Amino acid sequence: MTAERDTGTEELARSVAVASVLVLAFAALLVVLDRCVPTSGAQRRDADPLVQLLGERAPWLVIAATIIVAGAWRRHLRIQRSDLLGALAGVATAVVLTLAIRGILGPRLPSFIPSEESARPGVTLGLAAGLIEETAFRLVLLPATLFALASRMDRRIATVLAVVITAVLFSLSHELGPAGGVFAPRFMLTRFLVPGLAMSVVALRTRMSFLVFAHCTAHLLIPSLLPG
């Protein structure tokens, strides 16, 4: 049992390390976007609450955070072919799902989806949002919580608790200060269930690179497909 636990822990650490390095490609793209597609005050006001919290230098702070996290995980880095395939599958999945959502919902978002999940923040701040959310919650909080709990209890229970804790903190960080605005139960539920809970489950059940690339790619596509 101990050997299985150690194997599972090491594999998750490796998967997170790989994703943290591969996602630097999106950080590099964010550098280009920040230079070529400047943001306006209105876009910053409509951006993801976490991006708003970081202020006008949000893209560069997000890039710095991504680099720091990648460096912290580097000792576990062992890239496998399946990680690269997972990243490509994540990109393809994001394209298909985003187009499907656009086809089903049309150009307007339903009332239970926060407005930052639209074209309003622009592509630069949209990518910054996806990148900081994945860096902070999927590449730091989720594995750190899981590793801490797994050392004290059954790994299956630890996994469930880690996913739920991550989802709760994800939603609260967007709804309450200092980042969040006015508390909106419908938005909190959406954030808890989708980017918080469901995406964390997918990340742990597949490859971390799959989910990270899917989420960041979706944020690149949203500005042109979901005007809001």
Image: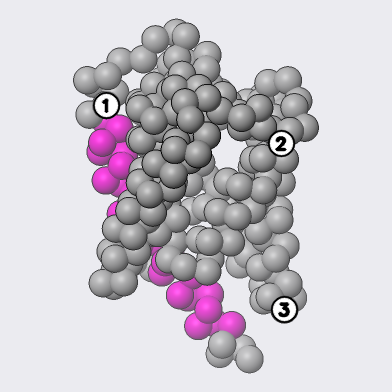
Q: Which one is in front, 140 or 108?
A: 108
Q: Vertically, is 89 above or below 166? A: below
- Real-space Cα distance between discs 2 and 1? 29 Å
Magenta region's main secondary structure? Answer: helix
Magenta stretch encompasses residue 19: yes
Are the residues flagged by discs 3 and 2 in contact, CB closer than 8 Å? Answer: no
Query: Is 21 left or right of 157, judged from the image as shown?
Result: left
Task: Assign a secondary structure to mark 1.
Answer: helix
Q: Residue placed at 73% from the left, 20% from the top?
A: 182
Q: Which residue is mark 2?
A: 188
Query: Measured from the top left, where is residue 164 in percent x and y?
Result: 71, 56
Q: Residue placed at 63% from the left, 91% from the top?
A: 1
Q: Amino acid at mark 1?
A: Leu
Is disc 1 surrounded by few (<14), some (14 to 19) or many (20+) residues within 10 Å? some
The answer to whether one can see residue 164 in this image is yes
Task: Assign a secondary structure to mark 2.
Answer: helix
- Sequence-wise, the earlier of marks 2 and 1 is 1
Residue 33: image tag: 1
Q: Which one is in front, 56 or 210?
A: 210
Q: Amino acid at mark 2?
A: Met
- Real-space Cα distance between discs 1 and 3? 44 Å
Query: Is 98 left or right of 26, judged from the image as shown?
Result: right
Query: Measured from the top left, where is residue 50 in percent x and y?
Result: 55, 29
Query: Measured from the top left, where is residue 107 in percent x and y?
Result: 47, 26
Are the residues flagged by discs 2 and 1 in contact, CB closer than 8 Å? Answer: no
Q: Quadrant of residue 199?
A: bottom right
Q: Which mark lies nearer to you, 2 or 1? A: 2
Q: Which mark lies nearer to you, 3 or 2? A: 2
What residue span does the magenta drawing correspond to? 5-31
Q: Which residue is mark 3?
A: 154
Q: Which mark lies nearer to you, 1 or 3? A: 1
